Image: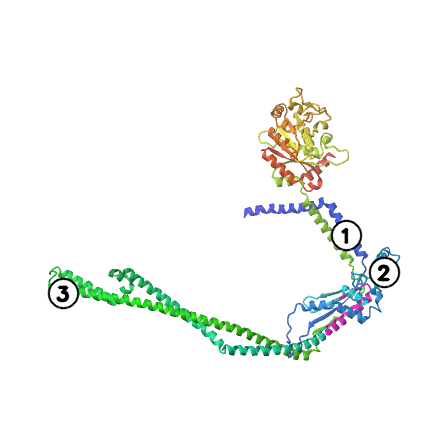
């Protein structure tokens, strides 16, 4: 319990950090969020305020199925979830809309309300539309029956199709503006119609109810008339089919003697069951007798082995005979002690024993013969039962085949009879109920005159525009953040790679600012303090003593490794330490240019053996010594991996407190990999917002493969948006105020 309670605060902190990170992502991408929000809201404002106001008049109608009166139809209502939806589709159908047009004579009396001529010369857009329409007329010929002009529903040509008539065009417009809503858990349907004119909205809404009722009644009458005609003709056909099928069934039953086919089908399975049971018993009995008979064969004439067979051991005659023989032998044994073999008493006793043995043998022979006969009889009984079982199965199969055909023909008869009876009943029923209405309709609330526009709802649209714009902006911000695979903060580095971050350097902004001279010009600035933190990390990076020879490298060019080397050297000098910078980038050297020094004599001269002069130079005005790269050689990799380079590093480490090696990027060349073997440790400079995780992963693998002693990362070019919310943000704010 104690452990669980101890873990809860950490879980809360984790959730708080995650929420804070989400907030910082939005804060960092706020320009994208506000841009998308502004665009979406602006488009919403344009669409909302340019839309034509619409007035809506609605009515409520109760619609239920007519289940008829008792005796004619089932008076109990059944659940039909699709009924009201079907009625809604009928209300919004083109036929109902066309009835409204015809009943109100909208194509003549109110044509201008629907098919207005919009060719206004004063309108720029109308002028363009007129020009396009004239071009289409010249290209495809003049439009036919286009008296409405300019309406989007009835004034377009599609291939060789004819233009819709005014009535159909107006009906299509009514259909588009009509809305039907089902009131939940009721049979009430709300019918609403919208129009630019409130009076027309109410007029059409009133006419829609009557048109719907007329359409339902018309559907019922048309369906009933057609149903009567169809059922009458269909009943005659079904009656003929029924008669033919009944005759065919009778002929088949007579030809195959199937009068009692159902009784036979119940008897044969019983016979099969009885024969199968008897067959099992016969097989078991035969198997038992066969085992006994085989044991008798194995014993042969051996009386002792035959006595072990159960049929002999359990025979009462043999049991008595064995006892008599045993007694006779005991008697002979006792007499032999008194008399000789030829004594009459001994002869008589031997004769009695022989007689008993003969009787025993006779009984054994009888039992053997009996067992053999029983075995033969069991085999014969099994064969007889097998023949009866096979014969019964064949009879049942033949009967089943006949019964299958019988069942097929009987089903045809039953099906034809059912169809014929249903048609007959339907004809009678349809003749009685053809004038009844299938749907009951009651108007609960009549359409009212609309006082205010129903569309557009400006407040709702603007609120939705703000919400959708904000959510779209936030979504895009998170999408861009997800697709951005560059290093953003020291937390990312430590979390992904589990390695130390020595420090973070802020991106220097402002015209004329130079990161190379910033530490000297503003020693109390946040950037200078960042390098002091890096120095502290370096001094504490080893257990016994701080590293004296340090390699500074990066994954790619322009990530700030040379500037980092220079500023670390300047910070180390502030502790009265003697520091040397060696420019090991023999391809694109830069250290000499930062100090405005010549690069005539340097590292390449020493490694190639072309000079005996001193290549170590003191920087004017500073306590820093440098070894410039010298002339660019044709084989930099071979030079920096030579024994001379190792000797130089060892010798310089004896003369200086710290030796910093500025090396080429790891991903570009192999010079840095060779130099890692000559130093106490390596610093990798990472550029925030530029160095990708894939690039860093690949470079760290190369360094790990050569067993590099990794001191830590230096995160360079950090921005406040990436570092927002972290300790680094508060730290820079603190030191900014302090410097001020």
- Viewer can see residue 299: yes
How far from the left and from the top, in percent, is residue 367? 27, 66
Quickly name the residue at label 3.
348
Q: Tell whether position 210 is magenta.
A: yes
Image vertical order of residue 543 relative to residue 219, above or below? above
Choose top left, top right, bottom left or bottom right for residue 704: top right
Query: In the orientation shown, which residue stands out farthest toward the right?
Result: 122
Q: CA distance from mark 3 to mark 2?
A: 152 Å
Q: Foreground mark, 3 or 2?
A: 3
Residue 476, horizontal then vertical, whole percent: 71, 48
Badge 2 element: loop
**Which mark, residue 278?**
none
Q: Is residue 56 visible?
A: no
How many marks do you count on the picture? 3
Residue drawn 86% across the image and 55% down it:
124
Q: CA distance from mark 2 to mark 1?
A: 30 Å
Q: Nearer the viewer, residue 219 or 263?
A: 263
In this figure, which residue is indicated by the disc labeled 2? Answer: 118
User: Could you tell me if the residues under marks 3 and 2 are in contact, i.e. CB atoms within 8 Å?
Assistant: no
Residue 45 within the segment the image draws in magenta: no
Residue at which label 1 appears: 41
> What's drawn in magenta, residue-wise?
192-218
Quadrant of the drawing holding the C terminus: top right
Q: Does residue 545 sit above or below 194 in this rendering?
A: above
52 left or right of 391 in image? right
Decide which of tag 1 and tag 3 comes sooner along the chain.
Answer: 1
Task: Give the farthest residue toward the top.
Answer: 612
For marks 3 and 2 on the same chain, the one whose residue lies earlier in the sequence: 2
Secondary structure found at label 1:
helix
The front one of 202 and 576 is 202
């Amino acid at each position: 319990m104690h452990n669980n309670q101890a873990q809860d605060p950490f879980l809360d902190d984790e959730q708080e950090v995650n929420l804070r990170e989400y907030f910082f992502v939005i804060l960092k991408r706020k320009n994208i969020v506000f841009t998308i929000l502004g665009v979406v809201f602006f488009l919403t404002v344009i669409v909302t305020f340019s839309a034509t106001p619409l007035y809506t008049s609605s009515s409520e109608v109760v619609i239920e199925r007519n289940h008829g009166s008792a005796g004619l139809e089932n008076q109990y209502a059944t659940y039909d979830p699709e009924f009201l939806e079907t009625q809604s589709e009928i209300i919004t159908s083109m036929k109902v809309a066309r009835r409204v047009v015809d009943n109100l004579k909208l194509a003549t009396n109110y044509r201008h309300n629907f098919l207005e001529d919009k060719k206004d010369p004063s309108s720029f857009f109308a002028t363009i539309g007129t020009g396009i329409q004239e071009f289409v007329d010249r290209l495809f010929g003049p439009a036919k029956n286009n008296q409405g002009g300019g309406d989007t529903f009835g004034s377009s040509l599609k291939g060789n199709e004819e233009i819709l008539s005014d009535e159909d065009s107006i009906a299509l417009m009514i259909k588009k503006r009509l809305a039907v809503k089902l009131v939940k858990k009721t049979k009430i349907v709300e019918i609403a119609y919208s129009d630019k004119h409130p009076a027309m909205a109410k007029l059409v809404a009133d006419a829609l109810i009557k048109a719907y009722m007329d359409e339902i009644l018309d559907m019922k009458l048309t369906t009933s008339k057609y149903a009567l005609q169809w059922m009458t003709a269909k009943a005659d056909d079904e009656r003929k089919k029924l008669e033919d099928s009944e005759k065919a069934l009778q002929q088949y039953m007579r030809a195959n003697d199937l009068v009692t086919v159902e009784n036979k089908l119940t008897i044969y399975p019983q016979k099969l069951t009885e024969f199968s049971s008897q067959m099992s018993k016969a097989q078991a009995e035969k198997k038992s007798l066969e085992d006994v008979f085989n044991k008798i064969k194995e014993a042969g004439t051996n009386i002792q082995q035959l006595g072990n067979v159960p049929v002999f051991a359990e025979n009462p005659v043999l049991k008595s005979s064995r006892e008599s023989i045993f007694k006779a032998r005991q008697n002979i044994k006792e007499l032999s002690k008194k008399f000789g073999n030829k004594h009459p008493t001994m002869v008589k006793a031997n004769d009695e024993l022989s007689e008993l043995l003969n009787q025993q043998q006779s009984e054994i022979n009888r039992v053997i013969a009996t067992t053999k006969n029983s075995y033969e009889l069991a085999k014969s009984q099994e064969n007889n039962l097998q023949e009866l079982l096979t014969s019964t199965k064949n009879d049942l199969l033949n009967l089943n085949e006949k019964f299958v055909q019988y069942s097929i023909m009987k089903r045809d008869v039953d099906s034809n009879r059912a169809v014929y009876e249903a048609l007959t009943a339907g004809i009678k029923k349809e003749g009685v109920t053809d004038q009844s209405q299938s749907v009951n309709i009651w108007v609960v609330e009549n359409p009212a005159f609309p006082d205010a526009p129903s569309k557009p709802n400006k407040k709702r649209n603007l609120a939705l525009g703000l919400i959708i714009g904000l959510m779209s902006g936030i979504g895009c911000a998170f999408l861009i953040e997800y697709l951005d695979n560059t290093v953003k903060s020291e937390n990312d580095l430590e979390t992904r790679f589990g390695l130390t971050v020595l420090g973070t350097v802020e991106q220097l902004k402002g015209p004329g600012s130079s990161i190379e001279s910033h530490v000297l010009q503003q020693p109390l600035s946040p950037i200078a303090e960042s390098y002091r933190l890096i120095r502290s990390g370096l001094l504490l990076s080893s257990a016994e003593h701080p590293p004296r020879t340090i390699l500074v490298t990066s994954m790619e060019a322009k990530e700030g490794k040379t500037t980092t080397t220079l500023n670390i050297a300047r910070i180390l000098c502030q502790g009265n330490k003697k520091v040397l910078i060696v420019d090991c980038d023999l391809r694109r050297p830069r250290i000499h240019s930062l100090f405005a020094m010549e690069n005539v004599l340097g590292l390449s001269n020493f490694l190639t053996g072309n000079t005996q002069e001193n290549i170590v130079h003191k920087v004017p005005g500073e306590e820093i010594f440098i070894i410039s790269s010298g002339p660019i050689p044709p084989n930099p990799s071979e030079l920096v991996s030579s024994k001379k380079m190792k000797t130089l590093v060892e010798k310089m480490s004896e003369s200086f407190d710290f030796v910093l090696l500025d090396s080429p990027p790891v991903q570009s060349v192999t010079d840095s990999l060779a130099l890692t073997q000559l130093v106490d440790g390596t610093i990798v400079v990472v550029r925030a917002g530029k160095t990708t995780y894939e690039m860093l992963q690949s470079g760290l693998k190369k360094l790990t493969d050569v067993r590099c002693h990794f001191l830590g990362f230096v995160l360079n070019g950090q921005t406040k948006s990436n570092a927002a919310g972290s300790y680094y943000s508060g730290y820079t704010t603190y030191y900014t105020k302090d410097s001020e």
